[in-house]
Amino acid sequence: MLLSDKDDAGGSSSLDGEYSTEYAKSGKSKCRGCEEFIAKDSLRVSQKEYTSQRAVMYGPQDLWHHVDCFVDKRDELGFTADLDPSIIKGFGKLKPEDKALLYEKLGKGKKTAEKRKQEAKKDTNGNKKAKKEETEEEKTLREQSKLLWSMRDKLSKDVSNAAMKLLLQLNKQEMPAGESRDPLIIMGDFNAKVGTDKVDDIVGKHGLGIRNERGEKLIEWCQTNNIIVGNTWFQQPPRRKWTWKSPGDETRNQIDYMMISKRYRNALLLAKTFPSADCYSDHVPVVGKFKLKLKKNTKPSANIKFDLAILKTNQTIREKYQISVQNKFEALGDAEEVEQQWENFKSARMEAATEVIPKVKRKAKQKWMTEEILNMMEERRCAKGNKEKYEQIHKKVQEECNMSKENWINEKCKEIEQQQKHAP
């Protein structure tokens, strides 16, 4: 596939833009000939590539080479001997010594930029070559490609990257309220690609595709809130990773995620997709397997304390208690076993005491403790699920405790002073 763009010389033909040359902007690009890194600011030459997945998604990609490697592979790359270095895009911006280097390595071809310009002008006057007739398959592919690119253009117009970036900045979503020990699971379509590069303990290396700007934003949010991207931590074949496919099934990406709070990352045992599920959607289900061990909430039964002293002072309650015990014990009947007789007697006494004898009023452990403070403590205990309310009540309890304790100490000091004054 060849493009038709204008080059530095101003000509246009089927080779315009096919080859490029420039000074390396960084030292990260690799030569496609020797597989070595190309040093920063050194001269490099490229040929456009159109067939890879990245090229289909983002446009033609440059395959960079060292000058010597490009010369060695010129026949394979289609830069034949009759082509002049001046047709390479970016040639006019090179230093004179680098232009001379390309002429030395590649030679002066017959088809220079000037000749190509004249040929193009000649073609526009009606001397065009006969156009090759398209086959049915080529026509279908061209129409499909045109349809897909038009869809992409419409989608990009609806929500641009700049608009999405601004939206994410304005819409700073906070974490749902709850105690830190609660497991938090977030699932859905985030329309972001986190890629295969591992990021600390947030993103694993088993993702899919190449990270984009929205993926970076999602990772930043996860780092801020201690959330891990669960899909990326389990090694699966690509068919178990992709979550969305484009119209026509030309592209498949991973944009739906199952995320969980970092504290419970070991509870997520598996996360993968089921592309065979019949959901009538361009998204496929993401299924996770969790194993949560919940602590059993066992509350010890408190012993009931009865005010038995009242049986000595209150004759009415004492008589009621005696009658109640006798009636309940007789209702149980005689038992042959001694243990059963004891259980019957104990049961009768407890039931009668619960009905007749009042319970002992709770006593404060601290002598300066008041009934009002005890009630506030009970209210604080009930508000344990609401952190803000709990803190407010706790602050009041602390203030009341300090004040009550100080007053009690002052009273005791006054008593001691009075006793010292009246002491013989």
Image (spheres, rainbow, N blue to C red):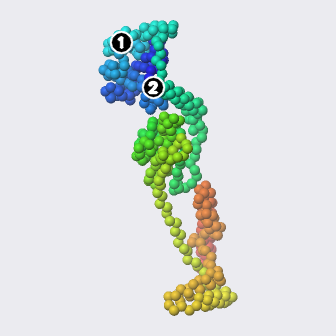
Residue in the image at 34% along x and 19% along y: 74
**Residue at the image position 57 percent from the left and 84 percent from the top:** 347
- On the question of residue 390 being in view, the answer is yes
Q: Quadrant of the N terminus?
A: top left
Kindly tell me whether residue 394 is visible in this rendering: no
Q: Residue furthest right?
A: 316
Give the labeled residue for mark 2. 60
Amino acid at circle 1: Asp
Residue at 47% across, 60% down: 293
Q: Counting other residues with Cα less than 10 Å from the Cα at mark 2, is it few (<14), some (14-19), or many (20 or more)?
A: some
Q: Are marks 2 and 1 in contact (CB under 8 Å)?
A: no
Residue 389, numbered label: none
Q: Which residue is mark 1?
A: 82
Q: Quadrant of residue 161?
A: top right
Percent coordinates x, y for residue 300 in the rendering: 53, 72
The image position of residue 21, as x and y in percent, is: 40, 19
Q: Nearer the viewer, residue 333 or 145?
A: 145
